Amino acid sequence: MPTTPVSVRRVDADGIALWGFGDRALDVLFDGRRVWSFWLERDTRASVTGRLSGLRSIEWPSALRKFLDGNTRLGITEHVSGRVLFDRETSFGTSADRIQVVGRSGAPISLDKSGRISPTFDTRTAEDTLPLLRAIDTVLDAVRSAGIEPFLAYGTLLGAVREKKLLGHDSDADVAYVSAAGTPVDVVRESFRIQRAVHERGFRTYRYSGAAFRVDVVEGDGAVRGLDVFGGFIDDADPSSGTGSRLYQMGEIGADFRREWVYPLTTCTLEGQTFPSPAVPEPWLEAAYGPTWAVPDPAFKFETDPRTVRQLNGWFRGTATNRAAWERTYSGNRGRLPSEKPSPVARKAQRRLQGSGRGGGTVIDVGAGRGGDSLWLARQGLTVHAYDYVPTASHAVQDAAAAEGLDLEVRMLNLDEWRSVLAEGARMARVDGPKVMIARHVADATDRFGRESLARFASMALRGGGRLFLDVWSTPGRTPERVHPVPVGEVARLMEEQGARILVTRERPARAGSQAGQPSGSRRSSRGRLVAQWD
């Protein structure tokens, strides 16, 4: 199909309508600053006769909608050519103010290629990013201390090779290494050893999979930036490889490769500093981004072949179910304190530990989310351990608690990973004094293995009189996204198998739905509640 010029037909609160043929990356700017990018054909929806008419439309991303109240000079440009397609003062909503797409700290933010709202590098100063560059150097040294030679990878390597600087539309940093090990299990063991070496240097880390983890880096203005560490290995015995060997690199690479394209390492320049890179970086970048890697693309999406996805999932990713979706859910509120009132479960936990003259104790909040209950409980004078699959969601609460001198700690718990469950269960078992665990909509947000792990974790943490308060959606009907009804009786049986004494199981009857967009007479799932104790 021929490529034609693009024209913008409509911009309003619903989205953007365009006309044109030929896919290309487009940038959306508010008052001259890029806030979002998309591809003309890949990311838009054709009209009824779209293939013939060329008319296409795209809705505003949900993460940006909350900012659309006020005035802005709205621009739409072709990313590569810079051609201006639309440049007009535009109003949304009722506010007379300028639209400010900023985080809680006031720092500018935009949508990254993963659909997360983040402070991309084009909004940061050299002073802001200096701690990240220093952290890259420190993490590289930590990996080397484990006997591995790491290098810049993915967007960070691409920026160094193509522009000698951090990519403006990128929002994190990446390093990688190719293990000398020849089997996935040894790569996993090695990755955990490297994570411990990084942790010993004072960094907070979060594991993505068996061969990848993130390092949290605090930038100059207090913003937290991710630095990802990706493991990989070369299979020298792959019979399908045209080169005789195949590179598997977390998170998206499975490609015919030669070891000499990586080692011995050479160097590259990033933001005026020297860092290690693969011996021949071009084949690595082509394996990651395809043959057009040299063409800037702020809306790039990985399209990993099914074989590689299947292999990486089977070897390394079995413990990261729905992690990316949950991270996107929380990214729009990053840095903001939750405003909701404490849940009934939190109030029950507080009364259990402090009511009738009791002296207090420890609350273990599993599935803490943004941490609203955790912060409220800590403000009541209780010790709180807030656990979540995406602990960054609670970092604002942890920072607030530290500023107020409260006893609250945020930690990662992955119910689909035995290493995480057993390690944290042993840690909580060593906590003395009265303990209560709350788990609001955790059992219905995980799978069967995760529910079994939750029961094991509670059993380890609560022996000696600790009590669990648990809520689930328990009958067929409407539930929040990524939550699926689980019969409260099924959860009770799992707890009993781990030695619990069930004190309460009950369900609040379902009611006919009345929310907008719901069919008449549709029903919401019943809410089940369980209280269990380990004597």
Image (cartoon, grey):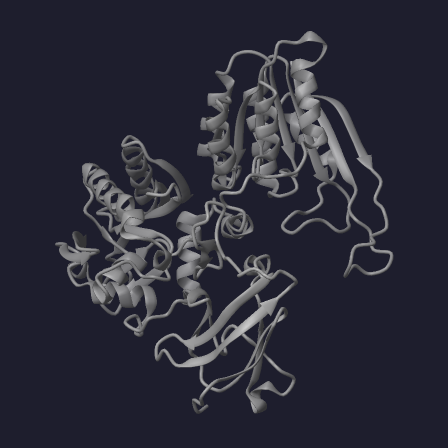
Residue 2: quarter of image: bottom left
Instruction: Tell me which residue sits at (60%, 43%) in the image.
Output: 447
Instruction: Tell me which residue sits at (64%, 64%) in the image.
Output: 93
Instruction: Tell me which residue sits at (69%, 32%) in the image.
Output: 343
Mark count = 0
Q: Does 151 sit left or right of 3 as displayed? A: left
Residue 348 in percent (x, y) is at 71, 23
Instruction: Tell me which residue sits at (49%, 37%) in the image.
Output: 396
Q: Is residue 137 at least partly visible in the picture?
A: yes
Residue 408 in percent (x, y) is at 51, 25
Q: Does 178 sit left or right of 16 as displayed? A: left
Residue 282: quarter of image: bottom left
Q: Does 7 sit left or right of 214 as displayed? A: right
Q: Does 161 sit left or right of 203 as displayed? A: left
The quadrant of the picture occupied by the C terminus is top right
Q: Is residue 97 above or below residue 458?
A: below
Residue 83 in percent (x, y) is at 39, 81
Residue 76 in percent (x, y) is at 46, 75
Tell which residue pokes out farthest to the front in this image: 96
Q: Is residue 77 above or below residue 171?
A: below
Q: Nearer the viewer, residue 181 or 6?
A: 6
Q: Nearer the viewer, residue 462 or 349?
A: 349
Residue 469: quarter of image: top right
Q: Is residue 230 at least partly visible in the picture?
A: no
Q: Nearer the viewer, residue 232 or 366?
A: 366
